[in-house]
Image (cartoon, helix red, strand yellow):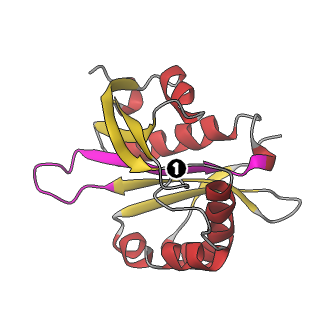
Amino acid sequence: MTPPVRTLTAAQFTSHADELGRLLADVVAGGASLGFLAGLTAEQAADWWRARTPAVDRGDLVVCVAVDEASGRCVGTVSLALNDWPNGRHRGEVVKLMVHETARGKGLARALLTTVEQVAADAGLTLLVLDTETGSPAEPLYRTAGWTPVGVIPDYAGDPAGIPRPTTLFYKRPGGRRA
């Protein structure tokens, strides 16, 4: 069963930093390219999340989580980074979609993506963008969820081993609007 996905308030976000850190460290250790290199500890990852607190407090970053009710462990997350440039307030970036290996294959990534898309639509955003490592397990998810690939950038970011990998850029209109 897929755990429910909920959007954290600013106050709730702070109390989830350690769990989010454990999730991030686990996912990076599993090979996901999320901006970090192998060897990331749960403490370092939790500190990274805590450094996002001002953005969450301002409403510039919306964090959604899925918590396994039996264990109380955070098994998935996705965030929406809002654009504060005057000419870009209509768009947002979907970032840090993660599902713990024990929760994969149960539809949680799709539930997280659906939730963040609805959050964006509710906020009045008309355009979403994201990037993912080309050939990663996430790429087919985005394609089947209606995201449009724009192109591939070679050697965009290093994987956890530090090897440069290409990224595929995607966009989507929240709420089913056409491009």
Residue at 49% x, 45% y is 116
Q: Which residue in the rendered view is the most extreme toward the left?
A: 87
Q: Secondary structure at mark 1?
A: loop
Task: Give the position of the C terminus as an image quadrant.
Answer: top left
Residue 135 at least partly seen: yes
The residue that mark 1 highlights is 33
Residue 12 at least partly seen: no
Identified by mark 1, the residue type is Ser
Q: Residues within 10 Å of mark 1 (few under 14, many from 20)?
A: many
Left-right relation of 103 to 109: right
As drawn, 20 above or below 153: below
Q: Position of residue 86 (x, y in %)?
A: 11, 55
Residue at 35% x, 42% y is 155
Residue 31 shown in magenta: no
The stretch of residues the image draws in magenta is 82-101
Instruction: Identify which residue, 38 or 101, lies in the foreground.
Output: 38
Residue at 40% x, 30% y is 175
Instruction: Identify which residue, 75 or 175, lies in the foreground.
Output: 75
